[in-house]
Image (cartoon, grey):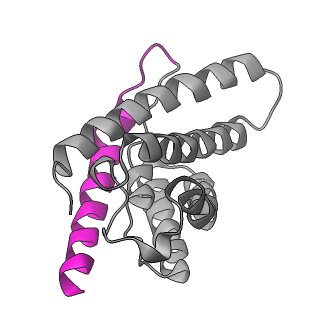
C-alpha cells in the first residue's frame, strides 16, 4: 500500500515536471501540443477509490494550471476525466472488480483493450481542453485539427511510455 502511494507520487511529480518544463514548450506547426500528464489518470491503479481519483485528478489539473498560467482549464478537464474513468475502464476491460493486475497498461489489458480505453480518454480530454480554451466557433476547423493532431501525438507518447515502463505483467 505504501509502495503504491510512493510510486503514484513519483509518477505524478515526473509527469507534471515533463509536461511543464518540456512538453508545454513543444508546439509543432502551431497545432500539436502533446499532453502526457493525462497518462497519470489513465494509469491509476484499479483499486483506487473514486473519491481519490477525483481528488488526484483535481490536484494534477491545478498543478498544470499553476505552472502553465492557465486558469482552471486543466483542473476542470482532469476532474471530468477522473469522473468518467470508471465507466471507460468497465467498457474496455470488463468487470474491473475481478482483475488480477494492478494498473491499466498494455501488458495488463493487452493492446486490444488498452488502446481504445486510453485513446478515448485522451481524445475526450483534448476535445474538452481545446473547446474550453478556444470557447468560440470562429476557428472551429483549426480547433478540430489541433484536437486530432494533439490527440494522436499524445496517444503515441503514452503508448511508447507505457511499453517502456510496463514491459512485463505486474
* Percent x, y of residue 19: 34, 45
* Above or below: residue 87 compared with residue 139: below
Q: Nearer the viewer, residue 126 or 65?
A: 126
> Is 65 on the left-hand or right-hand side of 124?
left
Q: How would you classify the magenta stretch by its main secondary structure?
A: helix
User: Which residue is located at x 39 percent, y 66 percent?
Assistant: 44
Q: Position of residue 145 (x, y in %)?
A: 62, 19
Measuring 44% from the left and 75% from the top, which residue is drawn there?
A: 98
Does residue 90 lie above or below 48 as drawn?
Answer: above
- Asked which quadrant contains residue 86, the reply is bottom right
Q: Which quarter of the figure has residue 141?
A: top right
* Residue at x-position 24% and y-position 77%: 4
Quarter of the C terminus within the rendering: bottom left
Query: Which quadrant of the view contains residue 71?
Result: bottom right
Q: Is residue 61 left or right of residue 163?
A: right
Looking at the picture, tell me which residue is in the foreground, 75 or 106. 106
Q: Is residue 140 magenta?
A: no
> What is the span of residues highlighted in magenta in the rendered image?
1-30
Q: Nearer the viewer, residue 12 or 122?
A: 122
Residue 48 in the figure: left or right of residue 138? left
Amino acid at each position: 500500500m505504501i509502495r503504491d502511494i510512493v510510486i503514484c507520487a513519483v509518477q505524478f511529480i515526473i509527469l507534471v515536471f515533463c509536461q511543464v518544463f518540456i512538453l508545454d514548450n513543444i508546439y509543432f506547426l502551431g497545432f500539436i501540443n502533446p499532453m502526457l500528464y493525462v497518462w497519470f489518470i489513465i494509469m491509476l491503479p484499479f483499486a483506487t477509490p473514486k473519491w481519490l481519483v477525483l481528488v488526484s485528478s483535481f490536484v494534477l489539473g491545478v498543478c498544470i494550471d499553476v505552472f502553465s498560467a492557465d486558469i482552471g482549464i486543466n483542473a476542470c478537464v482532469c476532474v471530468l476525466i477522473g469522473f468518467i474513468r470508471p465507466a471507460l475502464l468497465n467498457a474496455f476491460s470488463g468487470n474491473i472488480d475481478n482483475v488480477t493486475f494492478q494498473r491499466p497498461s498494455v501488458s495488463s489489458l493487452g493492446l486490444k483493450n488498452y488502446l481504445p480505453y486510453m485513446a478515448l480518454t485522451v481524445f475526450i480530454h483534448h476535445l474538452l481542453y481545446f473547446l474550453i480554451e478556444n470557447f468560440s466557433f470562429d476557428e472551429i476547423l483549426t480547433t478540430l485539427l489541433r484536437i486530432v493532431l494533439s490527440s494522436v501525438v499524445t496517444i503515441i507518447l503514452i503508448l511508447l511510455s507505457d511499453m517502456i515502463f510496463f514491459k512485463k505483467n505486474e
